[in-house]
Image (spheres, rainbow, N blue to C red):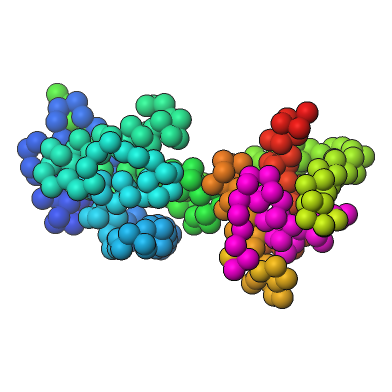
């Protein structure tokens, strides 16, 4: 027998589960995090981050999650989370007490997630059965996918990887294979592959940069001018988040309570608050589908600011044409 299979099950609770005859049916595959990876600092950081994010998101519902495996398997927390983040109304009871009801509930939730995230079945790294079985790897993949879709600016801990073992029952016995699997993006690889239109603009066509800046500034000025404001400089006038908030409010029809942001921010903290609020509004409106570092905006990073402005420009220039 593969020695890795024996090494993977040094913990009694894991071994006990797999001694049960019907845990893995013939021809079935099961992927698990190796015990040697379960206590890695990066994995613990991600688990804690997700727990705190869920609790923060569902604070008004008085839901408190302490364990991802134990508190999410029945679908109750996932139900509340999807309703809160995506305003989704799921045609299923909130509370499911029996395993049959829990499985039915999870089926509805998984179908909603797949449709909302526009995923093919081959892309899914979770299933009704794996979530119901309190599988940590599947639960993490599901939560990360939900977070990235509904909160693209959420600063998930990057480069979280685990060692996994895949177990399959065959006619000749158990077959195992080992792998390293990323749960959150390998930031170094993502950055190395990043090559969007603005990267090309800055590196390959700097002569066109001023023309693009001018078009964006004219677009912004046209709309915030209705509020008696003039915008002339991308680097300095967007760093405190105020213009970005007012522009988003004008275009998207948001009523911005003056108590929700700082109209005249006096510190970096207040500027970051404004920028984060603006980015959240853009993300919730489906206008922002890529991560943005709010500190880049506050620091006057031209490329970061132009990327964000273009999200609004590309939507509303069509309507104005």
Seen as rendered, the residue at the extreme left is 21
Q: Position of residue 34 (x, y in %)?
A: 29, 50
Q: Residue at x 54, y 47 (%)?
A: 284
Q: Is residue 85 magenta?
A: no
Which image quadrant: the N terminus? top left
| Residue 101 visible in image | yes
Residue 207, horizontal then vertical, whole percent: 92, 39
Snapshot quadrant of residue 145 = top left
As drawn, 51 above or below 115: below
Q: As drawn, is 198 to the left or to the right of 44? A: right
267 relative to 215, above or below: below
The quadrant of the image that shows the C terminus is top right
Out of 219 and 40, give the one closest to the viewer: 219
Q: Nearer the viewer, residue 94 or 306?
A: 94
Residue 311 in the figure: left or right of residue 109 = right
Is residue 202 among the parts visible in the rendering?
Answer: no
Residue 179 spot, x, y in % from top left: 38, 41
- Residue visible at 70% across and 60% down? 241
Check residue 235 for magenta coloring: yes
Q: Which residues are magenta?
A: 231-259
User: In the rendered view, does 226 fall on the left or right side of 162?
Assistant: right
Q: Which residue is outermost to the right?
A: 207
From the viewer's perspective, tell me whether residue 193 is left or right of residue 105.
right
**What residue is rendered at 68% in x and 35% in y?**
315
Using the image as rendered, state which of residue 233 and residue 290 is in the foreground: 233
Vertical comparison of 310 with 228: above or below = above
Most extreme residue toward the top is 171
Give the x, y percent position of residue 33: 31, 48
Residue at (84%, 54%) from the top-left corner? 231
């Amino acid at each position: 027998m593969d020695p890795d299979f024996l090494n993977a099950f040094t913990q009694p609770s894991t071994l006990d589960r797999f001694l049960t005859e019907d845990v893995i049916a013939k021809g079935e595959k099961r992927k698990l995090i190796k015990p040697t990876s379960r206590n890695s600092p990066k994995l613990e950081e991600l688990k804690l981050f997700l727990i705190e994010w869920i609790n923060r998101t569902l604070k008004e519902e008085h839901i408190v999650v302490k364990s991802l495996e134990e508190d999410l398997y029945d679908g109750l927390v996932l139900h509340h989370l999807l309703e809160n983040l995506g305003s989704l109304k799921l045609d299923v009871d909130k509370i499911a007490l029996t395993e049959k009801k829990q499985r039915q509930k999870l089926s509805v939730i998984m179908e909603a997630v797949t449709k909302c995230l526009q995923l093919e079945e081959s892309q899914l790294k979770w299933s009704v059965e794996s979530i119901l079985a309190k599988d940590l790897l599947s639960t993490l993949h599901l939560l990360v996918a939900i977070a990235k879709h509904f909160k693209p600016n959420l600063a998930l801990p990057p480069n979280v990887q685990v060692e996994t073992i895949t177990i399959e029952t065959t006619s000749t016995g158990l077959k195992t294979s080992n792998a390293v699997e990323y749960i959150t993006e390998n930031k170094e690889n993502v950055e190395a592959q990043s090559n969007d239109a603005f990267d090309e603009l800055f590196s390959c066509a700097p002569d066109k940069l001023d023309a693009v800046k001018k078009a964006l500034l004219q677009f912004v000025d046209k709309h915030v001018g209705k509020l008696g404001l003039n915008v002339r400089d991308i680097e300095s006038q967007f760093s405190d988040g105020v213009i970005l908030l007012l522009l988003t409010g004008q275009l998207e029809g948001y009523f911005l309570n003056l108590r929700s942001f700082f109209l005249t921010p006096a510190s970096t903290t207040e500027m970051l608050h404004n920028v984060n609020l603006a980015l959240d509004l853009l993300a919730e409106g489906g206008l922002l589908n890529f991560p943005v570092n709010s500190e880049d905006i506050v620091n006057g990073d031209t490329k970061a600011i132009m990327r964000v402005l273009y999200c609004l420009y590309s939507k509303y220039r069509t309507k104005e044409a």
